[in-house]
Amino acid sequence: MTDQKKTVEINFPKLLDVLGGIVGRVLLSPQKEQSKSVFKDLKQGKMLNLGVLNYGETLKIGAELKMDYSEFRGPGFNLDVMQAALSALLKQLGIKLKAQQDIKLMGSDEGTQLIGIPGVVQVGEQPNVLMMAVEFTNRTSIVVHLMFMDPDQFMAQPEDAEADS
Protein backbone atom coordinates (compact mmCIF):
# COMPACT_ATOMS: atom_id res chain seq x y z
CA MET A 1 0.00 0.00 0.00
CA THR A 2 1.20 3.48 -0.72
CA ASP A 3 0.29 6.58 1.16
CA GLN A 4 -0.92 9.21 -1.26
CA LYS A 5 -1.34 12.76 -0.17
CA LYS A 6 -4.31 14.54 -1.59
CA THR A 7 -3.94 18.13 -2.62
CA VAL A 8 -6.84 20.43 -1.94
CA GLU A 9 -7.09 23.87 -3.46
CA ILE A 10 -8.53 26.43 -1.10
CA ASN A 11 -10.14 29.60 -2.37
CA PHE A 12 -8.18 31.99 -0.16
CA PRO A 13 -10.46 35.05 -0.58
CA LYS A 14 -13.47 32.92 0.36
CA LEU A 15 -11.57 31.51 3.33
CA LEU A 16 -10.64 35.04 4.46
CA ASP A 17 -14.27 36.08 4.18
CA VAL A 18 -15.40 33.17 6.37
CA LEU A 19 -12.61 33.64 8.92
CA GLY A 20 -13.19 37.41 9.08
CA GLY A 21 -16.88 36.77 9.72
CA ILE A 22 -16.17 34.31 12.51
CA VAL A 23 -13.59 36.54 14.21
CA GLY A 24 -15.96 39.49 13.89
CA ARG A 25 -18.83 37.57 15.46
CA VAL A 26 -16.63 36.43 18.33
CA LEU A 27 -14.97 39.77 19.18
CA LEU A 28 -17.48 42.31 17.91
CA SER A 29 -20.49 40.55 19.38
CA PRO A 30 -23.33 42.76 20.51
CA GLN A 31 -23.24 40.78 23.77
CA LYS A 32 -20.49 42.71 25.56
CA GLU A 33 -19.95 40.09 28.28
CA GLN A 34 -19.19 37.40 25.68
CA SER A 35 -16.71 39.65 23.88
CA LYS A 36 -15.09 40.64 27.18
CA SER A 37 -14.58 37.01 28.15
CA VAL A 38 -13.04 36.12 24.77
CA PHE A 39 -10.83 39.22 24.83
CA LYS A 40 -9.62 38.43 28.36
CA ASP A 41 -8.64 34.89 27.34
CA LEU A 42 -6.83 36.11 24.22
CA LYS A 43 -5.05 38.83 26.18
CA GLN A 44 -3.78 36.15 28.58
CA GLY A 45 -2.24 34.30 25.62
CA LYS A 46 -4.84 31.56 25.34
CA MET A 47 -5.79 30.11 21.98
CA LEU A 48 -9.51 30.20 21.25
CA ASN A 49 -11.19 27.37 19.38
CA LEU A 50 -13.34 28.85 16.60
CA GLY A 51 -14.89 25.53 15.59
CA VAL A 52 -14.63 23.44 12.45
CA LEU A 53 -14.88 24.74 8.91
CA ASN A 54 -16.39 22.38 6.35
CA TYR A 55 -14.70 22.74 3.01
CA GLY A 56 -16.57 20.71 0.45
CA GLU A 57 -18.04 17.40 1.46
CA THR A 58 -15.00 15.69 2.92
CA LEU A 59 -12.56 18.26 4.27
CA LYS A 60 -13.00 19.56 7.79
CA ILE A 61 -10.54 22.16 9.05
CA GLY A 62 -10.33 23.27 12.65
CA ALA A 63 -9.92 26.99 13.24
CA GLU A 64 -8.30 28.71 16.21
CA LEU A 65 -7.63 32.31 17.17
CA LYS A 66 -4.58 33.86 18.86
CA MET A 67 -3.72 37.44 19.70
CA ASP A 68 -0.37 39.16 20.19
CA TYR A 69 -0.38 42.72 21.47
CA SER A 70 3.29 42.86 22.51
CA GLU A 71 3.96 45.68 20.02
CA PHE A 72 0.93 47.74 21.05
CA ARG A 73 2.10 51.25 21.93
CA GLY A 74 0.88 53.34 24.81
CA PRO A 75 -1.51 52.71 27.68
CA GLY A 76 -5.12 51.74 27.43
CA PHE A 77 -5.13 48.41 25.58
CA ASN A 78 -8.65 47.22 26.23
CA LEU A 79 -11.63 45.64 24.49
CA ASP A 80 -12.86 48.92 23.01
CA VAL A 81 -9.45 49.63 21.43
CA MET A 82 -9.21 46.08 20.11
CA GLN A 83 -12.72 46.26 18.68
CA ALA A 84 -12.01 49.58 16.94
CA ALA A 85 -8.85 48.19 15.32
CA LEU A 86 -10.55 44.93 14.35
CA SER A 87 -13.55 46.80 12.90
CA ALA A 88 -11.22 48.90 10.76
CA LEU A 89 -9.33 45.82 9.56
CA LEU A 90 -12.46 43.81 8.76
CA LYS A 91 -14.09 46.77 7.00
CA GLN A 92 -11.09 47.16 4.68
CA LEU A 93 -10.94 43.39 4.13
CA GLY A 94 -14.64 43.34 3.25
CA ILE A 95 -14.24 46.21 0.77
CA LYS A 96 -11.36 44.42 -0.97
CA LEU A 97 -13.19 41.09 -1.08
CA LYS A 98 -16.43 42.60 -2.36
CA ALA A 99 -14.58 44.48 -5.10
CA GLN A 100 -12.60 41.30 -5.88
CA GLN A 101 -9.39 43.27 -5.56
CA ASP A 102 -6.07 41.56 -5.01
CA ILE A 103 -5.07 41.31 -1.38
CA LYS A 104 -1.37 41.60 -0.67
CA LEU A 105 -0.09 38.51 1.13
CA MET A 106 3.29 38.08 2.72
CA GLY A 107 4.12 34.42 3.22
CA SER A 108 6.59 32.66 5.45
CA ASP A 109 8.36 29.33 5.16
CA GLU A 110 6.25 28.04 8.04
CA GLY A 111 3.03 28.43 6.05
CA THR A 112 1.77 31.66 7.60
CA GLN A 113 0.21 34.26 5.33
CA LEU A 114 0.20 37.83 6.62
CA ILE A 115 -2.75 39.72 5.16
CA GLY A 116 -1.61 43.13 3.88
CA ILE A 117 -4.57 45.04 5.30
CA PRO A 118 -4.00 47.05 8.48
CA GLY A 119 -6.56 47.99 11.08
CA VAL A 120 -5.41 51.33 12.44
CA VAL A 121 -6.64 52.74 15.73
CA GLN A 122 -5.60 56.02 17.32
CA VAL A 123 -5.18 56.01 21.10
CA GLY A 124 -4.60 59.63 22.07
CA GLU A 125 -1.75 60.75 19.83
CA GLN A 126 -0.45 57.19 19.35
CA PRO A 127 -1.53 55.18 16.30
CA ASN A 128 -1.55 51.39 16.59
CA VAL A 129 -1.75 48.88 13.76
CA LEU A 130 -3.57 45.54 13.92
CA MET A 131 -2.76 42.92 11.29
CA MET A 132 -4.19 39.48 10.66
CA ALA A 133 -2.28 36.39 9.60
CA VAL A 134 -3.51 32.93 8.70
CA GLU A 135 -1.33 29.97 9.61
CA PHE A 136 -1.88 26.59 8.01
CA THR A 137 -0.66 24.06 10.54
CA ASN A 138 0.40 20.45 10.05
CA ARG A 139 -2.52 19.22 12.08
CA THR A 140 -5.26 20.13 9.61
CA SER A 141 -6.18 23.33 11.30
CA ILE A 142 -5.91 27.01 10.64
CA VAL A 143 -4.75 29.50 13.24
CA VAL A 144 -5.87 33.10 12.80
CA HIS A 145 -3.37 35.46 14.39
CA LEU A 146 -4.44 38.96 15.35
CA MET A 147 -1.32 40.97 16.09
CA PHE A 148 -0.48 44.53 16.79
CA MET A 149 2.63 45.49 14.88
CA ASP A 150 5.16 48.25 15.45
CA PRO A 151 3.32 51.30 14.02
CA ASP A 152 6.62 53.02 13.13
CA GLN A 153 7.15 50.60 10.25
CA PHE A 154 3.93 51.86 8.65
CA MET A 155 4.71 55.56 8.97
CA ALA A 156 6.30 57.46 6.11
CA GLN A 157 9.59 58.93 7.21
CA PRO A 158 9.99 62.66 6.37
CA GLU A 159 13.40 62.11 4.75
CA ASP A 160 11.90 59.36 2.56
CA ALA A 161 9.14 61.70 1.42
CA GLU A 162 11.70 64.39 0.55
CA ALA A 163 13.80 61.90 -1.42
CA ASP A 164 10.75 61.05 -3.55
CA SER A 165 10.18 64.71 -4.48
Image (cartoon, grey):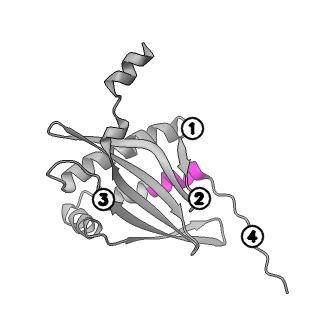
Q: Earlier in the sequence, mark 1 or mark 4?
A: 4
Q: Earlier in the sequence, mark 4 or mark 3?
A: 4
Q: Tag 3: residue type? A: Leu
Name the amino acid type tagged 1. Answer: Asp
- Residue flagged by tag 2: what amino acid is it? Asp
Among numbered discs 3 and 2, the one appearing first in the sequence: 3
Q: Residue at x 65, y 65 (%)?
A: 56
Q: In this rendering, which labeled residue sits more in front, label 2 or label 1?
A: 2
Q: Secondary structure at mark 1?
A: loop
Image location of residue 60, percent across then percent down: 58, 72
Of 11 and 29, the residue lying toward us: 11
Secondary element at tag 3? helix
Label 1 crowd (10 A; few <14 / some 14-19 / many >=20):
few
Separation (CA) of disc 3 from disc 1: 26 Å
CB under 8 Å between callouts 3 and 2?
A: no
Q: Considering only order in the chain, which callout, 1 or 2, is on the residue closer to the N terminus?
A: 1
Q: Position of residue 68 (x, y in %)?
A: 33, 60
Residue for badge 4:
6
Magenta stretch containing residue 137, yes or no?
A: no
In the picture, the disc for residue 102 is 1
Q: If the image is split into quadrants, where does the C terminus sit?
A: top left
Question: What's the amino acid at mark 4?
Answer: Lys
- Frontmost of labels 4 and 2 is 2
Q: Select label 3 or label 1 by which is in front.
A: 1
Question: Which segment did they paint magenta?
Answer: 12-19
Label 3: how many residues lie within 10 Å, few (<14), some (14-19) or many (20+)?
many
Residue assigned mark 2: 109
